[in-house]
Amino acid sequence: MGQKEKIRFWLLAAEKDWQVCAHLFEKGDNAYALFFGHLVLEKTLKALLVACNNKTPPFTHRLVLLAEKAGLELDSTQLEILETVTDFNLESRYPDEQFTFHKKCTQEFTQKWLGKIEGIRTWLLQEIR
């Protein structure tokens, strides 16, 4: 598979996850919508990594690490968003006994964070092109 096909692979996977994210949010499954929001950014960052160096991206879910490996300069807001969204990956998959994260994921909270995810996603897509 060539570089363009690898980039396309990651971007198509991210787009599919973005559709799932929207569907989950529409159905009120907010914690899992945020989990898929994380996947969208992870896969988009991996597409950017392939675009930058044509190497297989590392097997990690840590968004800040992926951004750094892609050579992105993050401002404090972007850094905070990527760190928080990385936490969504863990908190939704490994809930505590009280399901604290799931309770925190109100419609308003989730909508706010999906907006931030969409903003980072848009920026990353511009960096790829």
Image (spheres, helix red, strand yellow):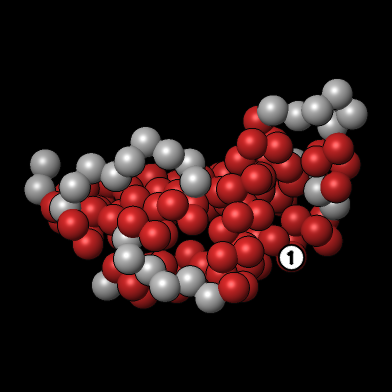
Point out residue 112 in the picture as x, y percentages from the top left corner: 74, 65
- Report helix, strand or loop for mark 1: helix
Q: Residue furthest left?
A: 2
Q: Which of the 4 image quadrants contains residue 118?
A: bottom right
Compared to residue 79, the image places residue 1 above or below, namely above
Left or right for 84, reference 78: right
Left or right for 44, reference 22: left
Point out residue 8 in the picture as x, y percentages from the top left corner: 25, 53
Looking at the rendered structure, the kind of residue marked 1 is: Lys
Please report the residue visible at 57 percent of the width from the left and 58 percent of the height from the top. Answer: 82
Compared to residue 94, the image places residue 25 above or below, namely below
Point out residue 72 in the picture as x, y percentages from the top left corner: 38, 68
Compared to residue 13, the image places residue 81 above or below, namely below
Q: Nearer the viewer, residue 20 or 62?
A: 62
Please report the residue visible at 28 percent of the width from the left and 56 percent of the height from the top. Answer: 49
Q: Quadrant of the N terminus?
A: top left
Q: Nearer the viewer, residue 65 or 100?
A: 65
Left or right for 7, reference 71: left
Q: Which residue is mark 1?
A: 112
Q: Which of the 4 image quadrants contains residue 51?
A: bottom left
Q: Nearer the viewer, residue 56 or 23?
A: 56
